[in-house]
Amino acid sequence: MSIFTEEEIAEFHLLTDPAQIESGEIRGDLDSCMIAGNVLCGKHTTINGYLNARGSIRIGKYCALGRFISVHAGNHRTDMPNQQVLFSRRFGFSLAFERRRVEIGHNVWIGDKVNILAGVTIGHGAVLAAGATVVSDVPPFGIVGGVPAKLLRKRFSDHVIEQMLDIRWWDWDDDKIRANKLFFESALEPDADYDLYPAIV
């Protein structure tokens, strides 16, 4: 099951199609990236450096991607005698390779040199610390780091996370975003409970 709606996916840009990128809604030098497969990306996401993205990958809106990030929606199988794809093709064997989509939610911050492996879902608002190797799902607004990546803490309290997922500010138009300066400039302590709704106009 996807973390994105069909309507959201329909608005995503295909990163291998230059015509879809020229609108300027994706920031970054895609010529310096290695993109292969069905890699979709939401508007206003920034790709700050080399990105190696292969397979079926969906990246949400307003994400910030660091440098030298690898996202692989496929992986060599370790439960078979052979692990090399070319070997399997040469002899006409079933491929020792599995494909599983990767989804990266809206407003996710991915630090430099992060690796994201096949089948992983990164929740909205998550943070992936620099150098992390992400092998399992990351909850919304979770901060993970390490090899393999582990949950270090949540950005906000469960109550605030619940509100953030309901508010879905990443779906707002530019005028509503501009009108909510107070909301976007609020510093929220990770363990405190806040009522976010009064701050929204």
Image (spheres, rainbow, N blue to C red):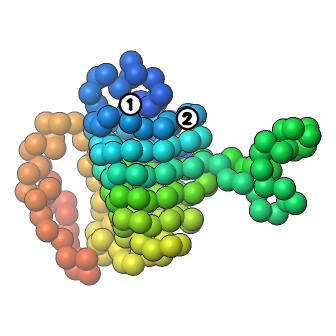
Extreme residue toward the top, this view? 19
User: Marks 1 and 2: which is nearer the front?
Assistant: 1
From the viewer's perspective, tell me whether residue 99 is left or right of residue 177: right
- In this rendered view, identify the residue nearer to me: 40 or 77: 77
Of pointers 1 and 2, the one earlier in the residue sequence: 1
Residue at image mark 2: 36
Amino acid type of the residue tagged 2 in the rendering: Ala
Disc 1 is placed on an element classified as helix
From the viewer's perspective, tell me whether residue 28 is left or right of residue 117: left
Residue 161: name its quadrant.
Answer: bottom left
Label 1 neighbour load within 10 Å: few <14, some 14-19, many 20+: few
Q: Residue at x 29, y 53 (%)?
A: 167
Amino acid type of the residue tagged 1 in the rendering: Asp
From the viewer's perspective, tell me whether residue 70 is left or right of residue 106: right
- In this rendered view, identify the residue nearer to me: 156 or 121: 121
Q: Residue at x 87, y 38 (%)?
A: 90
Residue at image mark 1: 31
Image position, residue 18 (x, y; %): 40, 22
Residue 62: name its quadrant.
Answer: top left
- In this rendered view, identify the residue nearer to me: 130 or 157: 130
Cα gap from disc 1 to disc 2, whole angstroms: 12 Å
Image position, residue 75 (x, y; %): 67, 53
